[in-house]
Image: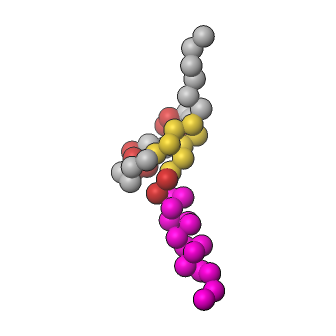
Amino acid sequence: MAAECVVVILGGTELPLDLTEAGCGVRLVDTARILLHAALDFAALPG
């Protein structure tokens, strides 16, 4: 049975510059984008 990759975690900041979901054919998880959104959400908290 062949293993199939369904998600790729992009753990480096430069990887999203070269890889796209359209080019890879699998779902990509951009950790830099996730951290960016978390930082913006935190910065928007009152107090």
Q: How is the image coloured?
A: secondary structure
In what quadrant of the picture does the C terminus appear? bottom right
Drawn side of residue 31 relative to residue 44, left or right: left
Q: Which residues are magenta?
A: 33-47
Task: Give the answer, above or below, for where 13 lies relative to 25.
Answer: below
Q: Dominant secondary structure of the magenta stretch?
A: helix
- The spot of residue 16 in percent (x, y) is 43, 49
Question: 41 or 24, which lies in front?
Answer: 41
Question: 22 or 14, which lies in front?
Answer: 14
Does the segment drawn in magenta span residue 27?
A: no
Does the segment drawn in magenta span residue 35?
A: yes
Please indicate, yes or no, whether residue 22 appears anywhere in the rendered image.
no
Residue at 59% over, 32% down: 6
- The spot of residue 43 in percent (x, y) is 55, 79
Q: Count the marks: how many?
A: 0
Residue at 38% over, 54% down: 13
